[in-house]
Image: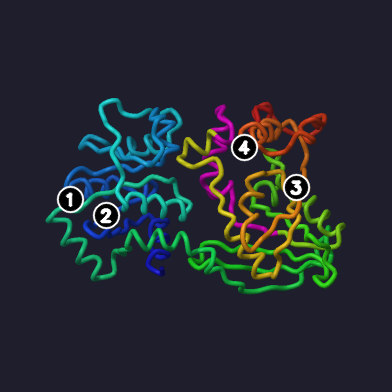
Amino acid sequence: MQHVERAIFDLRRGLPVVIDTPHTRYLVASIEGTTAALLDEMRNGARGVPQLVLTEHRLAHLGQAESSAPAAIELETTDSRDDLIQWAADPHARWPATREAMAVSDAGQAALALMRRGLLIPAAIIVAPDDHLGPVIKRRLDRGDLLSVAAADVFAHREAAPSLLRRVSEADVPLEAAPDSRFVVFREADGMREHVAIVIGDAARWPAPLPVRLHSACLTGDLFGSLRCDCGPQLKASLATINERGGGVLLYLAQEGRGIGLANKMRAYQMQDDGLDTVDADRVLGFDQDERDYAVAREMLAQLKVAHIDLLTNNPAKIEAMNREPIEVAGRSGIYGRLTRQNHRYLTTKAERAGHWLDALLSEPVLADTPGSDRNEQDY
């Protein structure tokens, strides 16, 4: 497992890693970390044809609408690094007409899993090394210059990660909306993410079922008051509601941008500025419309000895994800932010394309006194 975690960090640093399957070894690089020199090294040392592995969501945007699983583009000697970046992330790119979609190996699937876990664009360059590059890789592995992981370990790590969550620290943190609050910090095994349970009120006097809110971190909305979303007002409303109802728990989850990370969220924002909605922008980058995994939230509640909850949410997917052992969702309460010129399209998209229960909010008059330029009014 430690090798998987180190591989994620190497990929985030722009380094290639080795993925082993029972029969073949592969050299793998992220799109973000691939230089022209590394691409040439991989291409010149490949047994067979190097591949660019893409998710089914990216394939659909490229025009491969029938794709229901990841596939790969076989690279030619004339393909540049810029070509690969365009196929992986450019909203205007289309599938190259002269290429067939190739099946993806277990190593390719593992490579995509590592990219997602590392909050990188989910695309990978992958080659099976030839008789020249193979010994070079072996020497670099022996020196510790390269790291190898088994594809099976990557899949096992993905499944085991929530159960390895550790409760690492806690302290009382009085909040304006909830003065009797305690922050409990949980750290994931790979060290990538820390999540916070905000425990409000006296547990001995908590109501049943317990009010619980799952709030995914939103740097732009929660901290800076971005008008592109309703996250900041929802966070404040959730804390106040839980406090007014006699206490409960707000889980502040490190799942920025519905799980795609801050850098990819900014990439998606730029595409939204050019006319895409929030769902399509994420899929252009190769992500699903929601990459969050709530197994970690169930584990946090289990460690807090919370099982019977009233979930503060407008999202049906959260109810489905949380209503599993050992958690029982006994009820749901809506929780709303503000409807503004800048977030109207974003909220409408969530309602129409993700099924969020927002009729009550969307039926209200749009606030007209929020600052914003004409570009902001395109919304998101």
Quarter of the figure with residue 102: top left
Q: Which residue is mark 2?
A: 27
Residue identifier under label 1: 45
Q: Nearer the viewer, mark 1 or mark 3?
A: 3
Q: Check disc 3 and report its element: helix, strand or loop.
A: helix
Q: Percent x, y for residue 278? A: 58, 36
Relative depth, front residue between 274 and 69: 69
Please tell me the numbered disc located at residue 234: 3
Q: Position of residue 147 (x, y in %)?
A: 31, 64
Tell me if mark 4 has few (under 14), some (14-19) or many (20+) residues whose alpha carbon lies within 10 angstroms of its own: some
Task: Please state which of residues 81 and 48 is positioned toward the viewer in this rendering.
Answer: 48
Q: Earlier in the sequence, mark 2 or mark 3?
A: 2
Q: How far, Cα to Cα, is label 2 from label 3?
A: 44 Å
Amino acid at circle 2? Leu
Count neighbours of disc 2 (C-alpha within 10 A) and say few if under 14, some if 14 to 19, many if 20 or more.
many
Above/below status of 67 relative to 319: above
Front position in the image: 271 or 169: 169
Q: What distance separates the C-alpha of mark 1 from that of mark 3? A: 52 Å
> Looking at the image, is mark 4 or mark 2 earlier in the sequence?
2
Q: Toward which corner of the image does residue 169 lie, by quadrant?
A: bottom right
Q: CA distance from mark 4 to mark 2?
A: 37 Å
Residue at mark 4 = 354
Q: Which residues are magenta?
A: 251-279
Please say if the residues under marks 2 and 3 sit with CB atoms less than 8 Å apart: no
Q: Could you tell me if the residues under marks 2 and 1 are in contact, i.e. CB atoms within 8 Å?
A: yes
Q: Nearer the viewer, mark 4 or mark 2?
A: 4
The answer to whether residue 100 is magenta is no
